[in-house]
Amino acid sequence: SYELTQPPSVSVSPGQTASITCSGDKLGHKYAYWYQQKPGQSPVLVIYQDNKRPSGIPERFSGSNSGNTATLTISGTQAMDEADYYCQAWDSSTARFGGGTKLTVL
Amino acid sequence: QVQLQESGPGLVKPSETLSLTCTVSGGSISSYYWSWIRQPPGKGLEWIGYIYYSGSTKYNPSLKSRVTISVDTSKNQFSLKLSSVTAADSAVYYCARCGGDCYSDGMDVWGQGTTVIVSS
């Protein structure tokens, strides 16, 4: 089955740029999605179609997808961005999620 | 705005069938895809399957033999049945809406989730 691989954790200082990667075979040929999940809360879609932001998502969230890697970038990271982030893609009509990355802002 | 609410038993016995319902409020169930996703304690997200409002379905191959998702447009609800459950099926179960086309728009509205524990 299709697998998406994310680093388990990423750390960033407040105000700096955080990058979270998601790797999968020919991922660049598919759309990548990113979800943010804070403790005890439901996931929230922050990026769809590789690089589009849903209404209400701050401009500091951006995405890219090429080759085998999709990347979620958070510019000017704030304390409120500390959360788990999951990438997702569709393969053979099945939604696949990455294992998740815990973003720590310290 | 559209809101989703999961409901169903929080405790299911091993080998029995887990049944959950998602009620859609603030909008119509029509013209969208509706998914079920689960998250075991301390673990990541797993997509279970989706249903289009017309009734067509797609399931995760790993669960396909045990899953049935159905829709009741008159009640603005869709439901999940997972048979022959084991402890490994204990998780928070979420329902979610695809923005338009599931394959291009992402899951943009999520329920708050409901915890299901499988135990005798």
Image (spheres, coloured by chain):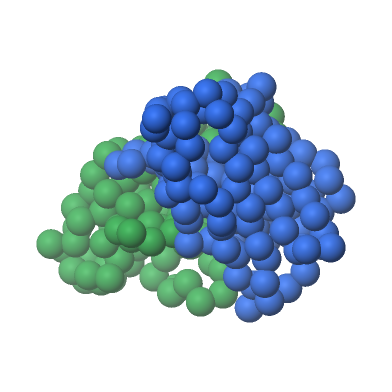
Chain colours: A green, B blue
Q: Residue at x 51, y 48 (%)?
A: B9
Task: Report the residue that reaches farthest toward the front.
Answer: B120
The relative height of residue B81 versus residue A34 in the rendered view (above or below) is: above
Task: Look at the image and tell me whether residue A41 can be seen.
Answer: yes
Q: Position of residue B47 (x, y in %)?
A: 56, 39
- Nearest to the observer: residue B65 or residue A1: B65
Say which quarter of the image contains residue A58: bottom left
Tell me residue A92's x, y (percent).
Answer: 68, 29
Q: Please state if B7 lies on the left or on the right of A20 as rendered.
A: right
Q: Is B93 on the left-hand or right-hand side of B44?
A: right
> Which residue does the image show at 32% across and 45% down from the upper left?
A101
The picture places residue A85, in percent across and down from the top left corner, at 37, 51
Q: Residue furthest right?
A: B54
Residue A65 in the image: x percent, y percent? 51, 46
Left or right, B29 with respect to A58, comes to right
Q: Is residue B110 visible?
A: no
Query: Which residue is at a point 56% across and 74% down the rendered structure image?
Result: A55
Q: Quadrant of the C terminus of chain B?
A: top left
Q: Residue at x 61, y 42 (%)?
A: B19
